[in-house]
Amino acid sequence: MERRTPAPESLLGRLRRRDWTLTAQRRAVAEALDGAHVHLTADAVHRRAAARLPEISRATVYNVLRELAALGEVREMGGEGRAKRYDPNAVEPHHHLRCERCGALRDVHPHGTNRLRLPPGERYGFALRGVDVVFRGLCPDCARAG
């Protein structure tokens, strides 16, 4: 039987709990980031937010994403040669699967690796704040395409 990790609290729920002022623009961005395995570019967030709030500007979306990242509520992920993506699952330890062809990302929760330890002798004086693990390969669609 496959073991499922419980869904984390939604971004909107976390923002409400911390009493962050939810303007219409901030709400539209938070709602755009809702869902499982969401790793959207700023342009994709803008498209989703504009479907809810047509007058929202691209600059506003970038500003809200920057604020959310500074709050630690969204993880900004480097795109390895692609546009940055924003992960609203910033509070639950997890890793990622990345398709090397199309860039698709999925959250994964392998057992026993959520808290990787780096021996003190291998830290070279770094004050560690986290760990990012990305498993790379081809998603099913790209693998079928050859």
Image (cartoon, helix red, strand yellow):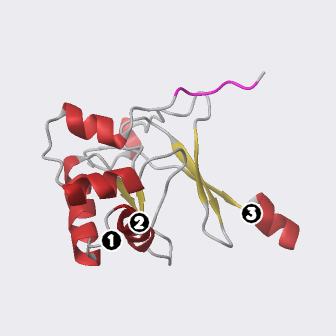
Do tag 2 and tag 1 residues touch (Cβ < 8 Å)?
A: yes
What's the amino acid at mark 1?
Answer: Pro
Q: CA separation, marks 2 and 1?
A: 6 Å
Q: Residue 101, percent across and down?
A: 68, 73
Residue 52 lies, with reference to residue 73, above or below; the image says: below
Q: Which mark is nearer the camera, 2 or 3?
A: 2
Residue at 22% of width from left, 36% of height from top? 16
Residue at 39% of width from left, 32% of height from top? 9
What's the amino acid at mark 2?
Answer: Ala
Residue at 82% of width from left, 65% of height from top? 143
Q: Residues within 10 Å of mark 2 (few under 14, many from 20)?
A: few
Q: Residues within 10 Å of mark 1 (few under 14, many from 20)?
A: few
Residue 97 lies, with reference to residue 83, above or below; the image says: above
Decide if residue 109 is on the left or right side of residue 29: right
What's the amino acid at mark 3?
Answer: Leu
Residue 73 magenta: no
> What is the secondary structure assignment of the residue under circle 1?
loop
Q: Which mark is residue 76?
A: none
Residue 3 magenta: yes
Q: Circle 1 is placed at which residue position? A: 54
Magenta-colored span = 2-6
Inspect this view and state whether residue 141 appears.
yes
Q: Circle 2 is placed at which residue position? A: 51
Quarter of the image for the N terminus: give it. top right
Q: Residue 37, percent across and down?
A: 55, 48
Residue at 46% of width from left, 50% of height from top? 132
Q: Residue 42, percent across and down?
A: 38, 70
Q: CA separation, marks 2 and 3?
A: 31 Å
Q: Which mark is residue 138?
A: 3
> What is the secondary structure assignment of the residue under circle 2?
helix
